[in-house]
Each structure stands twice: as structure tokens, then as C-alpha cells.
Amino acid sequence: MRNSGIGGQAVIEGVMMRNRSRYSVAVRKSDHTIEIKTEDYESFIKCAALTKIPFIRGVFNFIDSLVVGMKTLAYSSSFYEEEEEKPRDEKKEKAAMGATIALSIVLAIAIFMLLPYFLSTLLHPIVSSRLLISAAEGVFRLLIFLGYIVLISKMEDIQRVFQYHGAEHKCINCVEHGLELTVDNVRNSSRQHKRCGTSFLLFVMVVSIVLFMFIQVSSPFLRVALRILLVPVIAGVSYELIRLAGRSENLVVGLISKPGMWLQKLTTREPDDEMIEVGIAAVEAVFDWKAFLAGADPEECTVPSKEEGCREGRLSGEELCC
């Protein structure tokens, strides 16, 4: 297996693929044709050096992934909106997107970081050991996370998104295992991938459990503050773990990747051939898989825009398969 560095996510009736600073969105329209959009993405961090520093780069990469994800979801949903088309206000759209991302981060921290802590405080009258209470907090965190995954996996609309998620993974696995990107080859490829965003989130849960078990403070206020302030640290460590998993075939790395791969059985479904075609279209819009299979360096396999050609200053590292 050879690492391509590309990643993406499922969108509404489609797939987004990102290769360094360029991404594509392929959407299967109601008339069964495929609409493809490609764009260059400029990171909100202007200092390129910061995007290459281990543990720090993961935070920036995660935020960039959220921004691109929101943009592509909004684009894909526009094909299925029943409302009449209205004049676009880009400033309002950017403001709304920023507010949505900020709200999503706040809710995620509240539900997956703070709620488990407050639930664990209910054990204080019967448990005196701080270590046991921290362990209980970790169990609550994992149960809430797994419960959320199971709950959304039962939703009919989400199941189709998970099929496109499977198509995304299968396309990347197909190329990275040295196979030509055809429907038959993609269909026979695995729908689990080590760089999946599901695995990243599971790493976040596990890293937070370990960190909070060893960092103990007596003040309840400081405990809450630490769970908020350490979120970037947790994200940075988790990114390095997922990056290592994507690059290494080491037995130990494979073992720590297994739980995330198992969890992907819930967040991916087997796609049909039309969904696979959408995934292939998304890959081919930004990644020259033929050059990659011929042995070219992954960074040389970006498909440039017709107007601008190849861009310089690409982001380092691998993209998540969300």
C-alpha cells in the first residue's frame, strides 16, 4: 500500500475529494448526471511554516477540514433545495458559515468534553478515588460518542451519506493499493481507511481520557477550564496519530487503528455503482491517479485548474477521510 495523501468526505448525494490545496465536489443530480466543481482552498493560516509543525499543524488542518466540509455540504445541498433561487450575499454566507462552525465546535466541546465530566461528578458521594472518577468520565465520554454514532447511523438520509462515505474510502483504497480507478476495482476495495475522520474522532476520545486521567487538579473550575483549553492539544496529538496510521504498516500502529476501523463499519455503507462513479469523478478532478500508479510523487499528482495551473505553497500532511 502506498500513501496518496488525498482525503475527503461524503456530502449530500456526492463526494468531496481534497488534494493538498485543491478540492473537488462531485454531486449526482436528480437527472442522474454528475456535476463537478473544483476550487483552490487557501488556509486561514497565512504562515505556511505553522502548518508543518508537528502537533500544531493538526489543529489548523482540522479547522481547514471543517471549513471545506461546510462549504461543500452547502454546495451539494443547493441541488436539492426546493426554494426559489435567491441572490447570493457572499459576506452573509461567510458570516453564517463562521457562526455555524463556531457553534459546532462549542456544541462538540459541551457534549463530548464537558457533559461526561459533569456526569462523573455525580459519583463523588460514592467514589473517593479521583483516578476512578476520571476513568468513569472516560467511559461516559465513549458511551456518549458511540451512542451518537449508532443513533445517526439509523437515520435513512444519513445512510445514503454513509454509502457515499464508503465510496470515498473505496476510491482512495483502490488507488493506494495500486489498482486502476475503475468501477469494478473500486467495488472490490475496502470501505475502511486508516485516515478516516471517524478514527480521528475516536483517537480524540481516547487521548482525552488518558490526558485527563493524568492531569489532576483540585479546583472544579480549573477542571472545566482544562477540558476546554486542552482541546487543541488533544486534536494535535490525535492528528499525529492518524497521520502515522496512514503512513505506517507497523503491527503496533495497525493494532491501535483497529478500533477506528471497526467503528467505520457503522459510518460507511456499501455504495452502488452510481455512487462509485461519483467518487471516481471527484478523485479524477484533483488527483492524477495514473501518474501516481506510474510511480510519481503524490505531491506531483495534483490536477491543476485550467485557468491557474499548478499552485505553490501546498499544505503539508495528509487529508482526513471524513
Image (tube, grey):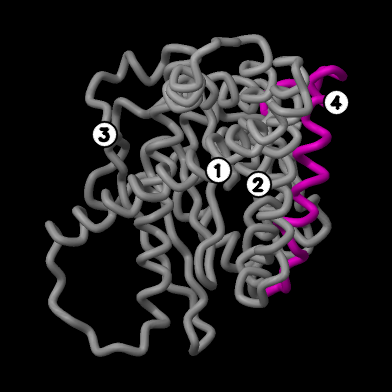
Query: In terms of secondary structure, where does tag 1 sit?
Result: strand
Residue drawn 57% across the image and 47% down it: 322
Q: Position of residue 260 (x, y in %)?
A: 75, 39
Q: CA distance from mark 3 to mark 2?
A: 26 Å
The correct choice, above or below, for 318 with respect to 183 in the image is: above
**Image x and y of residue 262, in percent:** 82, 44
Q: Which residue is mark 1?
A: 7
Residue 62 in the figure: left or right of residue 201 = left
Which mark, residue 172? 2
**x, y percent for residue 231:** 48, 26
Q: Which mark is residue 44?
A: 3
Mark 4 vs mark 2: which is more N-terminal? 2
Does the CB distance between marks 2 and 1 fall below 8 Å?
yes
The amino acid marked with disc number 4 is Leu
Q: Residue at x 54, y 45 (%)?
A: 111
Q: Which residue is mark 4?
A: 255
